[in-house]
Amino acid sequence: MGAFIAQKRSNGLLKSGETTTRRAVFDMEGVLVDGEYLVELAREVGKAEEIYALTEAGIRGEINWEEGLQRRVDLLQGISYERAQAATEHLNFMPGARELCARLKGQGWMLISITGGFQFMSERAERELGLDRVYSNELLFEAGQLSGVRLQVTSDKAQVWRAAFGADIHPQVALVDGANDLSLLELAELKLAFNAQPLVWRYADQVIQEKNLAFAWPLIEERFYAPAAAR
């Protein structure tokens, strides 16, 4: 199936010759990663369907995101640290993720991920995709077993951005998929909804309905690198 990219509205380009560092911010699961970490971990104890249902409800905005996250972690109490770490290896990066990140890095962009996911997947993505900064939640362990979660990223992801970069710096690009990403999407100059819930579409400049991040590059290129005659 070919990519479906719906253009909704267009804003101005950055000025030619501008040297300010450009920043792209990504959600992690469902965007950089093809899957959900807690769902994969839940397969280990036969609770994948329960975790998936709670995850999807939170992404769609049907339940309070923080409450849903706590309920998911509670269902997985007692899983070993080793299993939690190993679960990341069962997940693949989204097609096109490595290529898009490499291309942006080659153009001097700063790459940031703000995710409601957890440290194991975030650390792997940071290492393998060359992300500059990653902000995530932290699974807590006692005596080597999962005991809880430390919430560092809530559904107000813009708060995390402002704490890190200040109120005056905004991302040039945001790629997100869920209702819990909307505050972050609102900050960006180019708002990209990637395989997103319908709720997210109305806030996006562009909608990509194909599981391949390579389709994001032409949109970024058109916005930030198009010659003046093409504007």
Image (spheres, rainbow, N blue to C red):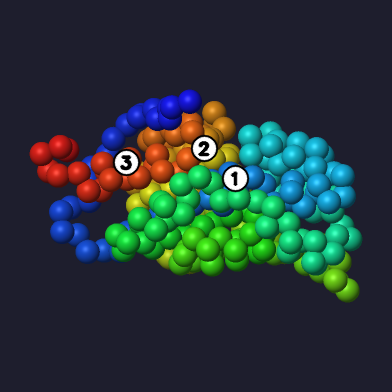
Residue 188 place in picture, x, y as percent: 39, 48
For the residue labelled by badge 1, is the local secondary structure a helix, a strand or a loop?
A: strand
Mark 3 belongs to which amino acid? Answer: Pro
Residue 182 appearing in the image: no
For the residue labelled by badge 2, is the local secondary structure a helix, a strand or a loop?
A: loop
Instruction: Identify the mark nearer the N-term, 1 or 2.
Output: 1
Mark 2 belongs to which amino acid? Answer: Lys
Q: Nearer the viewer, residue 79 or 137?
A: 79
Extreme bottom residue here?
143
Instruction: Identify the mark nearer the N-term, 3 or 1.
Output: 1
Q: Check if mark 1's residue and mark 2's residue have beta carbons within 8 Å.
A: yes
| Quarter location, residue 57 | top right
Say the numbered circle drawn on residue 142. none
> Few, some or many C-alpha atoms within 10 Å of disc 1 (few <14, some 14-19, many ≥20)?
some
Instruction: Identify the mark nearer the N-term, 3 or 2.
Output: 2
Q: Is residue 126 left or right of residue 22?
A: right
Residue 65 place in picture, x, y as percent: 68, 45
Q: CA distance from mark 3 to mark 2?
A: 15 Å
Which residue is located at x 80 percent, y 49 percent? 42
Write down the residue under mark 1: 34
| Quarter location, residue 141 | bottom right
Which residue is located at x 81 percent, y 47 percent? 43
Quadrant into which the C terminus falls: top left
Q: Is residue 2 left or right of residue 149?
A: left
Write down the residue under mark 2: 211
Extreme left residue here?
229
> Few, some or many C-alpha atoms within 10 Å of disc 2 (few <14, some 14-19, many ≥20)?
some
| Quarter location, residue 87 | bottom right
The correct choice, above or below, for 11 with respect to 174 in the image is above
Q: Check if mark 3's residue and mark 1's residue have beta carbons within 8 Å.
A: no
Residue 12 appearing in the image: yes
Q: Nearer the viewer, residue 2 or 224?
A: 2
